[in-house]
Image (tube, rainbow, N blue to C red):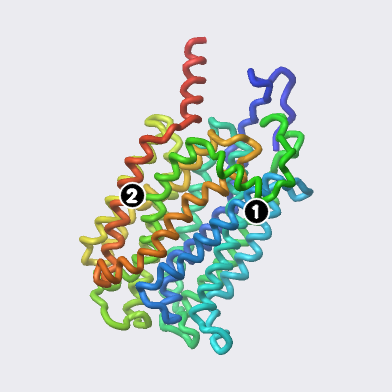
Amino acid sequence: MAATPSPGASNKTGLIPKPKLTIAQIFTMSFGFLGIQFGFALQNGNTSRILRSFGADVENLPMFWLVAPLVGMIVQPIIGHYSDRTWNRMGRRKPYFLTGALLSSLALIFLPNSGTLAGIIPVLWIGAGMVMVMDASFNIAMEPFRALVADNLSDSQRTLGFSIQTFLIGLGAVAGSILPELLSQIGFSMEAGPNGVADNIKYSFYIGAAVFISAILVTIFFSNEYTPAEYELYHGKQDRSQEKAGLTEILKDFKNMPRTMRQLGLVQFFSWFALFSMWVFTTDAVATHVYGLSGDYSKSIEYNEAGNKVSSAFGVYNFIAMVYALFLPVIARTFGRKLTHAFSLIAGGIGLISIFFIKDPSMLKFSMVGVGLAWASILAMPYVILSSSIPPGKLGIYMGIFNFFITLPQIVNGVFGGWIVKHIYNGEPVYAIVLAGFFMLCAAVSVLFVYDEGWVKIKQEKLINVTR
């Protein structure tokens, strides 16, 4: 990873400061996230319409989407726990990257072809099952990436590290979001095929599988991890007495989570409740509120056109997030991490609420500008704030446990969101998008009350340097 530190380089704690990594090293370390988010973008932008083409009613969509957060809630803490304890020839986190990439690529290929098994199992349940397998695989590949950045970077470089990671996430998501419409423009059919899925969607998923595994392989082959001996130089000797405790240790760590993590939990709840509504309901909200569709429209060309517009609009918010991520380190350094995150969430809330006032589908991209600012910050700032409060030997497990605050709001939304749309919103999903906007604003207020231990340390170090 870096040259051996020189004697006398240790700080007051007796630990040797981590060497600063170059932009290229940080970029390569996180490159696999480009592939992961390429796959996530295809899933987020197209799963609802695939399930609708298989026969799901709009008010039942959240129940199918529940599979993803439930799987994430189980998988991420387990992967985090064991990745903290994995040291082999491949590295510490890399074995999980590779396993997740292989499984994810297979799931991306199979999901749009789920209808081929309709004679054996109801096609809708096959599709939901593949969403579960896909999300479990994504989580296996994704969870260790957050820990890897915290493993290798000092407090002063973590905002940069997570921002570069967010930039790559945005780049992958932009490509994944615009791909279905791009393929339709070059001649791939938008009409539902024999299995209910249009060719432009099917081939987008095939391309996504190739991009996913290729990007992960870049990280595996061209980035390094610290050996156990190097890791202890920078983090101190690790307590290995609980290494065989297994799942009981996860429960103990959950009980003893840092104060900052508990406070960020409320911020994450509001943020991810809003995001779940956006991913699940935007296509049908645009189809009914903007295109004026009604009745059984799920297999119409107009519905697929609305889906393409939404997928492309999601590409806009991911592009904005990609660019905004490059400025996050400077903004956070100037205004602080919490204010930066609060501003970004306010922009996202305004963007979502504005969808209610749209009558021309081409205007949807302007709403997504605010969402893009929020998305970039959601993918970076909570992890920057959190990472400084976690004991070094627990980075993987606590990053995994932190996923509870992402999955729980999605589960709550999945259980109640469809019922609310049907019985309270009278079958008009656009109101779910409006509620999502207000929840983003609640998240912005909540983050102001979070204790940012890392920011306090940085300010103290600056004060010491000035007084010297």
Residue 69 appears at what percent x and percent y? Answer: 50, 60
Eye-nearest disc, 1 or 2: 2
Q: Is 196 positioned to the left or the right of 95 in the image?
A: left
Identify the amino acid type marked 1. Val
Identify the amino acid type marked 2. Met
Residue 40 appears at what percent x and percent y? Answer: 50, 61
Viewer-closest of 349 and 192:
349
Label 1 element class? helix
Q: Is 75 positioned to the left or the right of 1 in the image?
A: left
Most extreme residue toward the top, as rendered?
A: 468
Instruction: Report which residue position mark 1 lands on.
Output: 218
Quadrant in which the N terminus is drawn = top right
Question: Residue at the spot x=47%, y=52% of the render?
Answer: 406
Residue 53 appears at what percent x and percent y? Answer: 42, 80
Q: Are marks 1 and 2 in contact (CB under 8 Å)?
A: no
Residue 308 appears at what percent x and percent y? Answer: 38, 70
Instruction: Report which residue position mark 2 lands on.
Output: 440
Label 2 element class? helix
Viewer-closest of 392 and 320:
392
* Residue 168 vertical position relative to residue 458 in the rendered view, above or below: below
Viewer-closest of 110 and 166:
110
Q: Is 260 positioned to the left or the right of 344 in the image?
A: right
Question: Residue at the spot x=63%, y=40% of the render?
Answer: 394
Give the mark nearer the N terminus: 1 vs 2: 1
Q: CA distance from mark 1 to mark 2?
A: 35 Å
Circle 2: is it few (<14), some (14-19), or many (20+) Cα within 10 Å? Answer: many
Q: Confirm whether residue 192 shows in the render.
A: yes
Question: Residue at the spot x=55%, y=66% of the render?
Answer: 208
